[in-house]
Amino acid sequence: MCIPHCVDPFIHQRIFGSPHILDSGCIIMNDTLTLDVIGRRVEVNGEHATVRFSGVVPPVAGLWLGVEWDNPARGKHDGSHEGIVYFKCRHPTGGSFVRPNKVNFGVDFLTAVNNRYVLEDGPEEDGKEQPVTIGNKPVETIGFDSVIKQQSQLSKLQEVSLRNCVVSCAGDKGAIAKACPNIRRVDLSRNLLSSWDEVLSIADQLKHLEVLNLSENKLHFPSVSPSLAGTFPALKVLVLNRTGITWAEVLRCAPGWPVLEELYLKSNDISISERPADVLQTVKLLDLSSNPLIDENQLFLIAHLPRLEQLILSDVGISSLHFPDAGTGCKTSMFPSLQYLVVNDNQISQWSFINELDKLQSLRALSCVRNPLTEGGSGPQTTRQFIIAKIGQLKTLNKCEILPEERRGAELDYRKAFGNEWKKAGGHQDPDKNRPNEEFLAAHPRYQSLCLKYGAPEDGELKTRQPFLLKNQLLTLKIKYPNQVDQKVTEKQLPDSMTIQKVKGLLSRLLKVPVSELLLSYESPKMPGREIELENDQQSLQFYSVENGDYLLVRW
């Protein structure tokens, strides 16, 4: 942004701050670098790196910076040159030497805001000079109003996105609070911030800050708890994905987030090492995705966060789960408020994992895709039915709502599918003789409750394979017309895979009634007095668990 040509630079500096003052922590680079730059984050030709060395590298004259690239493919060596180790890299090709004048050390926060959000000066109205009084002295200027307009523009900002804008520091003390005090949401992802202290210097000037994204900044966090001084009094959402933070550092900084509700810690190689004590107690959402060191025992350390409603554990490699405080059919005291669990892209291969989830007292939604359990074997529809049947309180699975009809169908099919196994294990239609063994109950914790809900499976049901496993099983149905007294009850054989739409088409041809006017439902002799609507034309008779001998009710 250009200073209007008739405005005193001192006035401009007071309004917008000075972006390149060394006291602010920002650096103007040249070939005679004297400041300590080790650990600073830099950009070179669009690639990000960390300075690991500053000095002379013989036999070539002049000053060099040794950098470790975020992308090791960008480098050439491991920090060594002609047998001498100048710095160390985590990757054998992660390092390079570059000249200081090729390196961008970034800009301060306010400069980045100006660059992104302040409009260019437009043509003056009527081209007239506008008198301004500074002190007691009138000064004629052109364009001063546009500076005031720009200042007003910044003060109204509530949401700021500075992703990839090479922000490296806070800038002059108090400048942010003066220029844009009303900011509530800030995206500072993929910048050049190198320390948590610099983040504090920015946040301390934004007292209304509610959302802060710091992802992809390689931050150095303090080794002792930072001085809080109410730095984040209103912060509700904090995103620290790919920042290199450890769990100990999370807990060390967490006292500064007294009202935090959402914390994102994806891809940090985090290992949960200790229980949060008097911190993170307000957190409702915690994202620990892509931290492969996490296992089920570590999860127990966060199991008593009182307000945790959503836990995201995608791609952590978890394969097993067991709540030791709850037996078969009981609820655990762990994760008391957890309503939504995400375990996508893991190594879950056993149904015992799903059985344990039924012990979570508040669980209502589950996302569990791209796991060995869900990808192979019996097919996605059968797997979905089994998960629904095994977790009784679930309302949403893989972002799809579970309607009452789907739950009923899933539970009935599950009850049938394992009926023979239940009988062999000691199950019986007579309640006094119904004593399945512990092994069966451990594998099917809800089976007994399903028998109480729908009745124990009868021998006749168990002689045939289950509907969801058969492609073309024929159902013998009795068709009734409740609103048509002159129509007699008829009997038809229909494939259980037939969709409701096709059933309507068949009936439309038989009855000479338009498909659009037909309404279908059915009754089961097993549940007298209960009528179930067949409202989804795309679903099959099998989906609604229609069985041999049921009554198909047709209205128009």
Image (tube, helix red, strand yellow):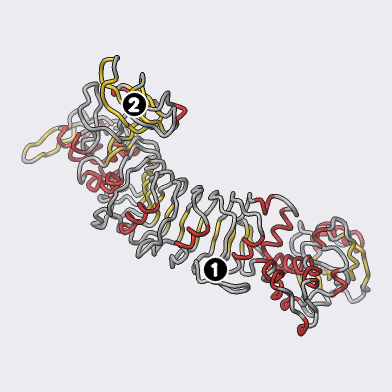
In the picture shown, does residue 12 fall above or below 357? above
Return the x and y of residue 247 as percentages of the image width and height.
Answer: 40, 53
**Residue at image coords 78%, 82%:** 433
Return the x and y of residue 323 as percentages of the image width and height.
Answer: 55, 66
Return the x and y of residue 101 as percentages of the image width and height.
Answer: 29, 22
Q: Residues within 10 Å of mark 1 (few under 14, many from 20)?
A: few
Q: Which mark is residue 324?
A: 1
Q: Nearer the viewer, residue 156 or 298?
A: 298
Q: Secondary structure at mark 2?
A: strand
Label 2 belongs to which residue?
85
Q: Amino acid at mark 1?
A: Pro
Decide if residue 12 is on the left or right side of residue 212. Answer: left
Return the x and y of residue 227 as percentages of the image width and height.
Answer: 24, 54
In the picture shown, does residue 347 fall above or below 15? below
- Indicate which disc, 2 or 1, sits on the residue closer to the N terminus: 2
**Quadrant in the picture for the N terminus:** top left
Quarter-of-image position of residue 428: bottom right
Q: Nearer the viewer, residue 520 or 402?
A: 402
